[in-house]
Every structure is written in structure tokens, then in C-alpha cells.
Amino acid sequence: MSEGSRLPGDVEPDVCAAFRDALDRVGSKWGMAIIAAASSGPIRFAELHRTIPGISRRMLTLTLRTLERDGLLVRTVYPTVPPQVEYTATSVARELFTSTRALSEWAENNHEKITASRAAYDRNAGTRR
Amino acid sequence: MSEGSRLPGDVEPDVCAAFRDALDRVGSKWGMAIIAAASSGPIRFAELHRTIPGISRRMLTLTLRTLERDGLLVRTVYPTVPPQVEYTATSVARELFTSTRALSEWAENNHEKITASRAAYDRNAGTRR
DNA sequence: CTGTATCCTTCGGGATACTG
DNA sequence: CAGTATCCCGAAGGATACAG
């Protein structure tokens, strides 16, 4: 994370810094999926593992720890046998999830345009020089 | 905020997919900084390089190419000597930038909480088991 | 001024096996 | 059930030098 030196004539460094800040927390491959899954109420480890397709137990654990550390998730252990652990999104995490909507909508609305632009760009790869 | 209805099966895959989609375009280290800088009007290569602290010419070029390919930037070359190149954010990019605000605000509002949570977590590192 | 080309390091994350 | 522990690889990105 680069808390860059502020230059005169700079591009709203506050906004950029804040945005990067958010991305650092949310940009991980599984972060938002986990927060989304834990936003509707407590959810157990195995349940998360089943709910999120493709995640490994390792990455699930790692991401959960990071989110817990940042105060986005609360981890509750029930000392039963076998052990039971629940994760719940905090209000901060739920607000984060909400703040995500605009971005998701942008992606939905522009996904096709981008795909097309990309195809066009690649098609002219030889032409361009 | 949306009321939490846990879907059977998995966690609103559409939303997650869309979000990841947006991140892929915006999650690069310098992407949003460049879009921000190019949102106010045409800006030259050297100007970008000066405006964005810490970016290397290499990463500037690479990121510019990616953004151009995705249709987020328009590249205009003036065949002068010395060469002059201008980059301008497209409307799609400017909408993306706008969609970013909620996230930035979330980061600004919660940055301190997160830092504190993190510090507390690390302080209890030995205690926890 | 506007890039390319190389080299090199870091790190996120997958596969797999083991554990309380 | 809920994790840890290793090993490994590819991609992102920094440093540096060269070029039209």
C-alpha cells in the first residue's frame, strides 16, 4: 500500500488512496464471496466451503483469518465434539458489501462492451503498429 | 441493504461474478489512478508519469494498453517530433470511476476501525489459540 | 517524448497430506 | 468438523537499459 507523497496538481490523492485501501481488503480472490455468504447470518466453515464453489480449505482459512483480523468477520467457536465454528459478517462488512453494488452493476452493464472492445483490439493486433 | 435471503445452492453467483469482473479491470495497482487522471480530459504520457507518484514507465505503458484494450481509454497519437500521445477516459471508464465512489467512501469511513481491529488482533496473537 | 526489452523478486493461490 | 503444514507455480510488478 503506497501512502504516496502528495504532489501539487495531483489527482485527488485522497480518493485514490481510499480506493486502493478498499481494494486491499476486498480485492482478494475470495474475500467478497465470503463476506456475501456471511452477510445473511452466521455460517459454518463447511457450509462456506460448500457454498463457495472452487475454494480450497487452505484459502478459505487464510481469507477468513484476514477478514477476522480486519474486523469484517466475527468468529464464534462452540467447544463441542466435533467442533463447530460460525462466522458472521460485521456491520462494517455489510456496509462494504453494499458499497459494492454500484461496481457490480457497472460490470453487468458494461461487460459486453468490454468484451467487444477487447475482441476488436485483438483483431487489429496485426494492423496496429 | 438487502434483506438476507440465503439462496439454496450458492451465494448469488451473478453478483459475485460481476464484482470479480469489475475487480479484474480495476484491481490492478495503477488502473484506477490512471482512469482518474484521464477522466478530467486528455492527458499525455509524461504528464501521467508525473501525476501518478511511484509508477514506472513500464507499468504505465502496460496498464495503459490494458485499459485501451478494454475500451476504457482512447489513445491519440500526434505524429510530431518529438512524439505526442494523449489518453482520454471513455464514458464507460468515467462511469466506472463514479461507481467507485461508494467504495472509496466506505474506505474513508472505516479505515480507522479496521486499523484498530487489526492492531487488537495482533496484540492478542499470543493469547489466542 | 514515448515507449520496449530483459531480468529478477515477490506473492497469491492451487494441490496435497496430515491433525486435534 | 475445522483446520495446519508443505511444496510449487504463474502472474504482477520493480529496476534497469536500450530505441525510434
Image: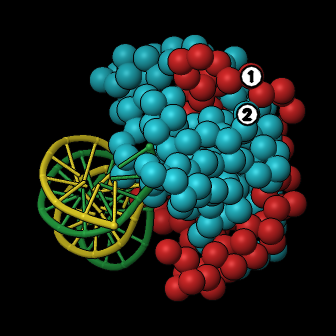
Chain colours: A cyan, B red, C yellow, D green
Label 1 environment density (alpha carbons within 10 Å; few <14, some 14–19, many ≥20): few
Give me the residue at 83% from left, 26% from top: B3
Horizontal relation, residue A55 to residue A77: left or right: left
Give me the residue at 82% from left, 62% from top: B110
Q: Mark 1 touching mark 2, by CB under 8 A? A: yes
Task: Name the foreground residue: B90 vs B77.
Answer: B90
Q: Quadrant of the C terminus of chain A?
A: top left
How many numbered marks, from 0 up? 2
Residue A38 in view here: yes
Q: Which residue is mark 2?
A: A40
Q: Which residue is mark 1?
A: B5
Label 2 environment density (alpha carbons within 10 Å; few <14, some 14–19, many ≥20): some
Residue A27 lies, in percent from the top left, at 57, 49
Residue C4 lies, in percent from the top left, at 31, 50
Task: Name the foreground residue: A77 vs A24.
Answer: A77
* Residue kind at label 2, given as amino acid type: Ser
* Distance from the alpha carbon under mark 1 to that under mark 2: 6 Å
Residue A82 lies, in percent from the top left, at 43, 49
Q: Quadrant of the N terminus of chain A?
A: bottom right
Task: Please say if A100 is above or below B110.
Answer: above
Task: Name the foreground residue: A59 vs B86.
Answer: A59
* Residue kind at label 1, given as amino acid type: Ser
**Subunit that carries the residue with mark 2:** A
Q: Quadrant of residue B117?
A: bottom right
Horizontal relation, residue A98 to residue B29: left or right: right
Q: Which circle marks residue A99 in the picture?
A: none
Helix, strand or loop for disc 2 = loop
Q: Quadrant of residue A99?
A: top right
| Discs 1 and 2 carry the same chain letter | no
Task: Please say if A49 is above or below A1.
Answer: above
**Subunit that carries the residue with mark 1:** B
Give me the residue at 74% from left, 67% from top: B114
